[in-house]
Image (spheres, rainbow, N blue to C red):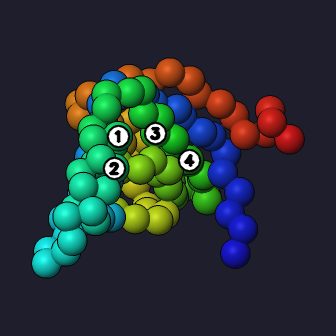
Amino acid sequence: MHTNYDIAIIFTKHTNLLQWFDAKYPAPTNTTYDKLQHYCNLRKRYAIERDVELMLLVRFEGDRLYCKIKCPINPLPIRGEFEACHLGAIVAFIGDNGWVMRQRIKIAMLK
């Protein structure tokens, strides 16, 4: 099912991607030295501080608000689309977690 969103709100945060890496690739056990070395080198690359982008997609369905976060390090314990009580609450929560709002785009402008 293709869902059309009304707004995209872009946030950035200067951080690393270790949270994503550690969740996706747990430390190997009972492995060879070469595989362990490769794992450590790969982990070092994800530990580099960089600007990470979070995209909050928003759609309205009547008086209901639905959101979806696209980011490798989602600050919410929710995957996929979720119903939110208020857009301001979601934006404030993301901001309180160190993300800075950079841009708000009406999707209709991109069509």
Q: Residues within 10 Å of mark 1 (few under 14, many from 20)?
A: few
Nearer the camera: disc 4 or disc 2: 2
Q: Which residue is identified by label 3?
A: 54
Q: Quadrant of the C terminus?
A: top right
Per the model, the C-alpha gap separating discs 4 and 3 is 10 Å
Nearer the camera: disc 2 or disc 3: 2
Instruction: Give whichever of discs 2 and 3 has the lower sequence position.
Output: 2
Nearer the camera: disc 3 or disc 1: 1
Residue at 43%, 61% (x, y): give it.
83
Q: Quick check: 40 left or right of 73?
A: left
* Tag 4 near tag 3, CB within 8 Å: no
Q: Which residue is identified by label 2?
A: 42
* Tag 2 near tag 1, CB within 8 Å: yes
Q: Which mark is residue 45?
A: 1
Q: Amino acid at mark 3?
A: Leu
Residue at 35%, 40% (x, y): give it.
45
Q: Residues within 10 Å of mark 3 (few under 14, many from 20)?
A: many
Q: Is residue 66 above or below residue 107?
A: below
Q: Which residue is identified by label 4?
A: 57
Q: Which mark is residue 2?
A: none
Per the model, the C-alpha gap separating discs 2 and 1 is 5 Å
Instruction: Give whichever of discs 4 and 1 has the lower sequence position.
Output: 1
Nearer the camera: disc 4 or disc 1: 1
Q: Out of 55 and 42, give the one closest to the viewer.
A: 42
Q: Amino acid at mark 1?
A: Arg
Q: Residues within 10 Å of mark 4 (few under 14, many from 20)?
A: many
Per the model, the C-alpha gap separating discs 4 and 1 is 28 Å
Q: Out of 48 and 91, give the one closest to the viewer.
A: 48
Q: Amino acid at mark 2?
A: Leu
